[in-house]
Every structure is written in structure tokens, then in C-alpha cells.
Image (cartoon, helix red, strand yellow):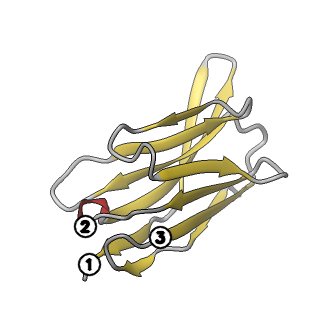
């Protein structure tokens, strides 16, 4: 059974920090893990992604403020969020990508709310 379990969301004041964690299980081979977010009335967007080879892709809107990293076991991904802004408020979803030959499989966590407000 595939599971992506997220933790670390919450309410924080502007300028504050949060760290999101996601642990994946039940996936045979993970090629990349990352975080997406979806604000009310907006489409889901990529925040940051890290591949099995440790290459990263970070959205321009969070570059310099957010850092993505993987745990030693490679099935865990973290998102360190600093200098948070109200526009970072969204539900954050953990994502894992598995490539089987030429077919891409995406797995999703249940989402964790991040609210940036004074």
C-alpha cells in the first residue's frame, strides 16, 4: 500500500519559518520527490522537487527562501520554509514520482495546511 505521510504544517507569522516533512512507503523505486501547493481559487503549482540524483528544481517565487532536501533513506523529503509571506498560504502536497520504463506514476500525500498570517 502506497503512503505519503506529511507533517509540519501550521500557522506562522509573516517572516517566520516552518519545516514540512514527508515519508513515503510502498513505492518500489522513487525517481523524484517534491512539494506542490494549492491556494484557494488557484491551480496546484510546483514548489520544489528533488531527484534521486539530488538535482533540485525550485519555483522562482520561493527561491532563496525555501530549501528542499531528502533524508538518508531517500524516501523522505523535507521542505524548509523561511521568510514566509502571506502569499505562501496554501495546502502543501507531497509528491513522489516513479518511472516504470516510460510510464510516469505520481503519488500524492493528503496535504497539509500552511497559513501565514499575523
Question: What residue is shown with label 3?
Answer: 17
Q: Rounded to the nearest whole Å, what is the CA distance between mark 2 and mark 1?
A: 6 Å
Q: Is residue 71 above or below residue 89?
A: above
| Residue nearest the viewer, comparing 105 with 97 | 97
Q: CA distance from mark 3 to mark 2?
A: 12 Å
Task: Please tell me which residue is depicted at 84% across the width and 52% down the height of the picture.
Answer: 73
Q: Compare marks 3 and 2 and give the one earlier in the sequence.
A: 3
Q: Which residue is mark 2?
A: 86
Image side of residue 77 versus residue 95, left or right: right
Q: Earlier in the sequence, mark 1 or mark 3?
A: 3
Residue 116 in the image, given as x and y percentages of width and height: 31, 73
61 or 105: nearer the viewer: 61
Is residue 75 positioned above or below 12 on the image? above
Rendering coords of residue 95 (x, y %): 54, 48
Q: How far apart in space, not on screen, are marks 1 and 3 (Cα)? A: 12 Å
Q: Residues within 10 Å of mark 1 (few under 14, many from 20)?
A: some
Residue shown at the point (50%, 70%) measured from the top left: 18
The dot on residue 117 is: 1
Amino acid at each position: 500500500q502506497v503512503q505519503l505521510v506529511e507533517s509540519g504544517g501550521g500557522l506562522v507569522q509573516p517572516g517566520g519559518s516552518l519545516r514540512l516533512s514527508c515519508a513515503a512507503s510502498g513505492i518500489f523505486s522513487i525517481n523524484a520527490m517534491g512539494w506542490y501547493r494549492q491556494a484557494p481559487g488557484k491551480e496546484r503549482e510546483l514548489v520544489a522537487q528533488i531527484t534521486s540524483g539530488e538535482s533540485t528544481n525550485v519555483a522562482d517565487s520561493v527561491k532563496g527562501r525555501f530549501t528542499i532536501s531528502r533524508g538518508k533513506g531517500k524516501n523522505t523529503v523535507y521542505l524548509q520554509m523561511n521568510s514566509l509571506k502571506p502569499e505562501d498560504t496554501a495546502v502543501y502536497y507531497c509528491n513522489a514520482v516513479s518511472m516504470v520504463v516510460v510510464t510516469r506514476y505520481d503519488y500524492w500525500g493528503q496535504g497539509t495546511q500552511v497559513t501565514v498570517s499575523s
